[in-house]
Image: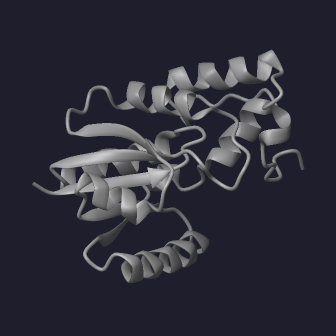
Amino acid sequence: MSTAIYPGTFDPVHNGHIDIATRAAALFDHLTIAIYDRPLKSLLFSTQERRAMIEAAFQHIPNISVATYNQLTVEFARQIGAQAIVRGLRVISDFELEFQMALTNKKLAPEIEFVCLMTGQEYAFLSASTVKEIAMLGGCVAGMVPPHVADALQAKFKAGSDRGEESVKLVSLRD
């Protein structure tokens, strides 16, 4: 049985992530979406909130499961018996980072393959930072995220939580 993981912070999950995961699930017998819960960046959503949003987005795909982890990605992949790590590529700068990570992971775990899938053209502009900034500024994120994620974004910014605006990396949408 072929097993892969699709790791990330998914803060929040958006349609580009969903595209990559859905396509990866068609390539492997089982795909685990692996939510990293100790990133070196500010998060808008807690690990539990991110997990719930991802589980809701993929409840209709039986060979996808969701897990959280807080160790090296290759160690988590070994722990669950994954043979591959799946990542998505949107732009050239993604390739540079993913290439470096792939080589590092190959050095740490030569038995685990690194598979990159190109994003669908309709999602090439999407990033979690962009989605969060649009939502923070009151813009419409329909078509960028599932409806339940749009609702969660709206609620998070409406509540004015202490994890609101200051946890959003601005990307230039105010210009």
Residue at the image point whose x is 69% and y is 41% from the top = 43
Q: Residue 68, percent across and down?
A: 45, 42
Query: Would residue 18 appear left or right of 14 to someone viewing this image?
Result: left
Q: Residue 90, percent across and down?
A: 52, 62
Residue at the image point whose x is 20% and y is 47% from the top = 30
**141, above or below 39, in the image:** above
**70, above or below 153, in the image:** below
Query: Quarter of the image containing the N terminus?
Result: bottom left
Residue at the image point whose x is 81% and y is 49% from the top = 170
Q: Nearer the viewer, residue 70 or 8?
A: 70
For residue 152, what is the image quadrant?
top right
Query: Would residue 171 appear left or right of 19 to someone viewing this image?
Result: right
Residue at the image point whose x is 81% and y is 23% from the top = 161
Q: Residue 110, percent across and down?
A: 30, 80
**79, above or below 109, in the image:** above
**61, above or below 77, in the image:** above
Q: Nearer the viewer, residue 89 or 59?
A: 59
Query: Would residue 64 appear left or right of 19 to someone viewing this image?
Result: left
